[in-house]
């Protein structure tokens, strides 16, 4: 009988070092992570961090330029824009996080199943995804919003989330299927089949963790898309409704009438949208570079 | 050997790699020389620095991570390491050519063969188009490719692996180099093709007086083709000498161990393989003194205390072992090998076979190239055609053949990973050919599998413990959490690993350890039959021996039966009771192991045995040059009649017309040949 001598030490596990590693390798990614973190804090603790009540109308102070009192000025109803942006972060995050999560997860499951079963099932799933992909994102979301009635829970329209999630599904499905196809032919999947494990076990236990990297990347990238989509739909009047503070909504309505005299009406919400989209996109990219071993020395 | 100064002299070469986990001293002070027209081999296991040292000579180290920190590389008196990038480019491809391991990826797929052969001619020799064309044709002829004019127009994917390697050699030869560095030139090739390529390289080097450095882990290749041998271990050269000296009178315990851990065709097989215990050292922090000391059976305190240097013990024969004098004197002899545990094979004749495969066929439909998206013309590949065999309890059937012969498909079909096109598979007397996955579930427990590649056969996201515990969990073989942990620990110990390794992830283990985990996973279901699909071919020689011994041990303890699929005839001979030889989807010969190796009847079996290199220079030189010509035909368009007739030296009209039926020619010897 042979035995292998090997030191029992050096089982260095990852968690703590991983964040430091990521920051060192991807400084821009770390920056975007900080922005996302600030946004999250603003979203969660809006009541505490915002200087004013975002809903309080003050006709004595309408269309005030930025000042110490109102950092980003006030709108046509005298509401504090900075506070509305902070509260808007909550709306943006909740909607984009949930819709991106549901869209990406459903897409990932369909993608893995498609790759794992192959043949007829693969064909059907993929052709259906092709149909969804044929519509531009915004058009598809518009159709879904228009077709569904509003169902508001906690001030947020569930159907808005569904509408944003659906266009995400086929896009994630495609990418995850491609990754899963390469996992499908790995001997450890054959080993699992040879041991007689059930299909669902193989899909969730053996394949899903191995496509986690592309899934996470798509998930963060579509967070940005979802924020943009939510803002667009709100701007078009199909998303969040007044008086709930939402970035897209802040750009529409009477902001369109007054922006020449009061540019801060659209400047700051626009900046918030750009910054959030930029941060999520950048974070997704850095995450991809970090998780892909081919980019490592 | 040319007099005067050597063509190439490597002096005290040091190479370092900066990695995120520390500085790796990949080559640590090696020196060797190559004379004109001479073939020098550098032998060693993976990670010993043999490839890195040759890349350093060529100035091709991966920048900026790798760099030469000390040493000189004198080529015709000029130090290559001090040359500018411009000067180095003029030498590369012109005076020194390099041939890589993987002929599939080292040719550019979008350039024709002609363009790739002519490229160095244009660049280095400033030839005109016509002159280059003529030279390219001449080169193809030189490397034994017929029909050159047509071949020059073709692209790499239209050629077979052997052909591509010939093209690589032609490119290397294009500018009449003085030195060719061949990095594992035949490792990716089949054994009959490997023999052709090596024969060609040796012949060319002799005729054109080209010096060669062959980098390889295959001792058989070295024995036949090298004049001198350098053995590397953990970034050092630990022994150097002529091929005869190193093979017949090895002076370093590592070399001795290496020689004895390879299964050999020319030696009796009734003893266990010697193994070198342990693993090579970590080159970020190599052990002090002799680097082999931690694994050496002759270790002494002095080995760790003193730095080792190569010293001559005989003319042209140097070693870095301080106890080499005792080895020369014969006072230091490795412990004799234990005999194999009791033979199980002979008792199997009457027993009910555990696996019976009858007239098994597996056809694949592949889209025919050139057919459009709408017209789906399909061609049939007969991957397995009419294959029958039985395996008795406790028996090992070796299944040998070259790549693409269908041996792996046989294994996959038996495992029901592929659905059989025809024929029957019975497991312990029950027909399982058309069982649904649900009906298979219980049978699955009895049939398990061990895969070739220990890197991809374990799920990287699961710990070793989870991997081994999963089958226990799914089949509810362990009642409690504690029972499960105990069973995992027991399985780990059974395959020679330690309990604490259950916490680790596969990437934290070495290749041999991973393969052991794969074996433990297979054993978890307490199978009676295991399909071993090339279980040792991805492992280093010294590790290979450990795994083979482990498989044999487990077989005798647990009364397992194996279907052992492999391309290495020596390994198959070592472990099998009976051997089946496959060629292009058919079994051409089946016999008891000793009978088959002593008395092969089918010309293909004879050719395979003839082509397999043996790590003994005397045996190798005495053998006739290999005779099997040609390439393996495409399975899309197999030859009529006997599939082997295109390469068979005995073939006649009958062979071209009729498919030979299997015939019983001995008590347990079956062959499918008209001429046998």
Image (tube, rainbow, N blue to C red):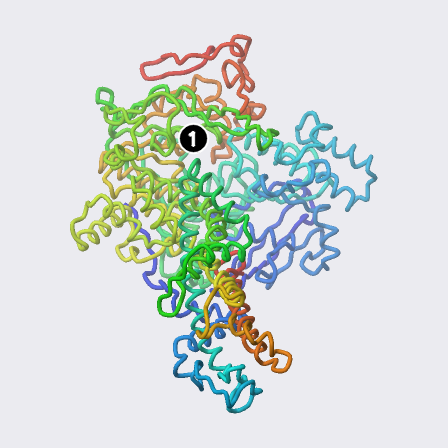
- Residue under circle 1? B569
Q: Quadrant of residue A12?
A: bottom left
> Which residue does the image show at 24% across and 20% down from the upper left?
B349
> Which residue does the image show at 19% across and 52% down from the upper left?
B486
B413 with respect to B117 (left or right): left
Q: How many marks?
A: 1
Q: In the current view of this chain or complex, which residue is farthest to the top?
A: B654
Picture coordinates of residue B649 (x, y %)? 55, 16
Q: Quadrant of residue A282?
A: bottom right
Badge 1: few (under 14), some or many (20 or more) residues near its Cα, within 10 Å? many
Picture coordinates of residue B4 (x, y %)? 70, 47
Nearer to us in this view, B74 or B201: B201
> Which residue does the image show at 26% across and 42% down from the upper left?
B523
Does any portion of residue B332 appear in the rendered image? no
Picture coordinates of residue A197 (x, y %)? 30, 42
Picture coordinates of residue A128 (x, y %)? 47, 44
B362 lies above or below B91: above
Does any portion of residue B71 appear in the rendered image? yes
- Where disc 1 sits, the SS reads helix
B656 lies above or below B202: above
Nearer to us in this view, B179 or B380: B380
Nearer to us in this view, B226 or A221: A221
B564 lies above or below B662: below
Q: In the current view of this chain or complex, which residue is farthest to the left?
A: B479
Nearer to us in this view, B658 or A87: A87
B348 with respect to B32 (left or right): left
Q: Chain of mark 1?
A: B
B15 with respect to A243 (left or right): right
């Amino acid at each position: 009988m042979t035995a292998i001598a090997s030191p029992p030490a050096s089982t260095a596990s990852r968690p703590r070092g991983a964040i430091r590693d990521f920051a060192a390798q991807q400084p821009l990614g770390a920056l975007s992570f900080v922005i996302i973190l600030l946004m999250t804090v603003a979203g969660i603790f809006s009541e505490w961090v915002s200087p004013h009540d975002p809903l309080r109308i003050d006709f004595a102070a309408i269309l005030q330029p930025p000042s110490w009192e109102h950092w980003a000025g006030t709108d046509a109803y005298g509401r504090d824009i900075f506070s509305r942006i902070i509260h808007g972060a909550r709306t943006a995050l909740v909607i984009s996080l949930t819709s991106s999560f549901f869209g990406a997860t459903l897409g990932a499951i369909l993608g893995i199943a498609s790759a794992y079963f192959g043949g007829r099932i693969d064909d059907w799933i993929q052709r259906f995804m092709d149909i969804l992909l044929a519509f531009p994102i915004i058009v598809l979301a518009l159709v879904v919003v228009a077709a569904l009635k509003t169902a508001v829970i906690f001030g947020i329209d569930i159907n808005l989330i569904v509408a944003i999630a659906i266009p995400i599904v086929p896009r994630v499905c495609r990418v995850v299927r491609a990754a899963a196809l390469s996992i499908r032919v790995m001997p450890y999947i054959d080993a699992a089949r040879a041991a007689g494990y059930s299909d669902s076990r193989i899909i969730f236990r053996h394949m899903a963790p191995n496509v986690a990297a592309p899934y996470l990347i798509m998930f963060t990238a579509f967070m940005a898309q979802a924020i943009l989509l939510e803002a667009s739909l709100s701007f078009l009047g199909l998303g969040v409704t007044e008086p709930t503070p939402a970035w897209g909504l802040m750009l529409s309505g009477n902001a369109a009438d007054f922006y020449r005299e009061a540019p801060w009406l659209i400047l700051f919400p626009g900046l918030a949208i750009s910054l959030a989209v930029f941060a999520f996109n950048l974070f997704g990219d850095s995450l991809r570079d970090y998780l892909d071993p081919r980019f490592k020395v | 050997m040319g007099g005067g100064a050597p063509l190439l002299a490597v002096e005290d070469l040091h190479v370092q790699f900066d990695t995120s986990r520390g500085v790796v001293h990949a080559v640590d002070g090696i020196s060797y020389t190559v004379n004109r027209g001479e073939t020098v081999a550098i032998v060693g296991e993976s990670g010993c620095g043999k490839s890195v040292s040759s890349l350093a000579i060529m100035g091709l180290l991966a920048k900026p991570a790798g760099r030469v920190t000390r040493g000189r590389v004198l080529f015709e008196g000029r130090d290559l390491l001090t040359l500018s990038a411009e000067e180095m480019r003029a030498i590369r491809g012109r005076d020194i050519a390099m041939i890589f391991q993987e002929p599939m990826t080292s040719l550019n797929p979008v350039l024709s063969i002609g363009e790739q052969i002519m490229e160095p001619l244009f660049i280095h020799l400033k030839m005109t188009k016509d002159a280059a064309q003529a030279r390219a044709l001449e080169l193809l002829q030189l490397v034994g490719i017929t029909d050159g004019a047509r071949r020059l127009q073709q692209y790499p994917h239209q050629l077979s692996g052997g052909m591509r390697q010939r093209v690589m050699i032609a490119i290397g030869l294009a500018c009449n180099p003085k030195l060719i560095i061949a990095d594992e030139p035949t490792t990716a090739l089949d054994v009959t093709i490997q023999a052709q390529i090596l024969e060609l390289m040796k012949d060319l080097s002799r005729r054109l007086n080209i010096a060669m450095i062959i980098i390889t882990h295959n001792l058989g290749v070295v024995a036949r083709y090298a004049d001198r041998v350098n053995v590397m271990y953990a970034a050092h050269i630990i022994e150097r000498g002529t091929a005869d000296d190193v093979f017949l009178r090895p002076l370093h315990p590592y070399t001795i161990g290496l020689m004895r851990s390879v299964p050999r065709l020319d030696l009796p097989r009734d003893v266990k393989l010697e193994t070198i215990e342990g693993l090579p050292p970590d080159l970020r922090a190599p052990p002090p003194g002799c680097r082999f000391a931690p694994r050496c059976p002759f270790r002494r305190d002095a080995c760790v205390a003193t730095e080792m240097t190569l010293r001559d013990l005989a003319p042209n024969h140097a070693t870095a072992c301080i106890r080499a004098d005792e080895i020369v004197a014969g006072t230091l002899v490795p412990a004799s090998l234990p005999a194999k545990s009791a033979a199980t094979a002979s008792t199997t004749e009457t027993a009910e076979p555990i696996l019976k495969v009858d007239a098994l066929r597996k056809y694949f439909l592949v889209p025919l190239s050139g057919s459009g998206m709408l017209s789906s013309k399909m061609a049939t590949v007969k991957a397995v055609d009419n294959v029958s065999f039985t395996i008795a309890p406790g028996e090992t059937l070796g299944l040998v053949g070259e790549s693409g012969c269908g041996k792996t498909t046989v294994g996959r079909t038996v495992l029901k990973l592929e659905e059989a096109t025809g024929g029957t598979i019975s497991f312990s007397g029950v027909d399982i050919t058309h069982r649904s996955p649900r009906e298979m579930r219980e049978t699955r427990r009895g049939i398990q599998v061990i895969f070739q590649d220990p890197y991809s056969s374990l799920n990287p996201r699961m710990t070793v413990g989870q991997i081994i515990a999963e089958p226990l969990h799914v089949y509810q073989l362990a009642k409690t959490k504690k029972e499960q942990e105990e069973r995992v620990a027991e399985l780990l110990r059974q395959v020679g690993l330690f309990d604490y390794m259950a916490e680790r992830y596969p990437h934290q283990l070495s290749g041999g350890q991973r393969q052991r985990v794969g074996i433990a996973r297979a054993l978890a279901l307490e199978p009676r039959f295991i399909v071993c699909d090339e279980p040792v071919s991805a492992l280093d020689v010294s590790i290979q021996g450990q795994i083979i011994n482990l498989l044999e041990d487990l077989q005798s303890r647990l009364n397992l039966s194996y279907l052992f699929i492999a391309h290495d005839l020596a390994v198959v001979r070592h472990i099998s009771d009976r051997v089946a030889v496959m060629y292009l989807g058919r079994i051409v010969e089946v016999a008891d192991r000793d009978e088959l190796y002593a008395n092969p009847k089918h010309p293909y079996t004879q050719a395979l045995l003839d082509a397999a290199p043996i790590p003994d220079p005397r045996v190798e030189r005495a053998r006739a040059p290999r005779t099997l010509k040609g390439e393996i035909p495409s399975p899309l368009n197999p030859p009529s009649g006997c599939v082997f007739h295109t390469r068979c030296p005995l073939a006649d009209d009958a062979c071209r017309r009729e498919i030979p039926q299997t015939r019983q020619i001995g008590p347990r010897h079956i062959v499918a040949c008209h001429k046998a």
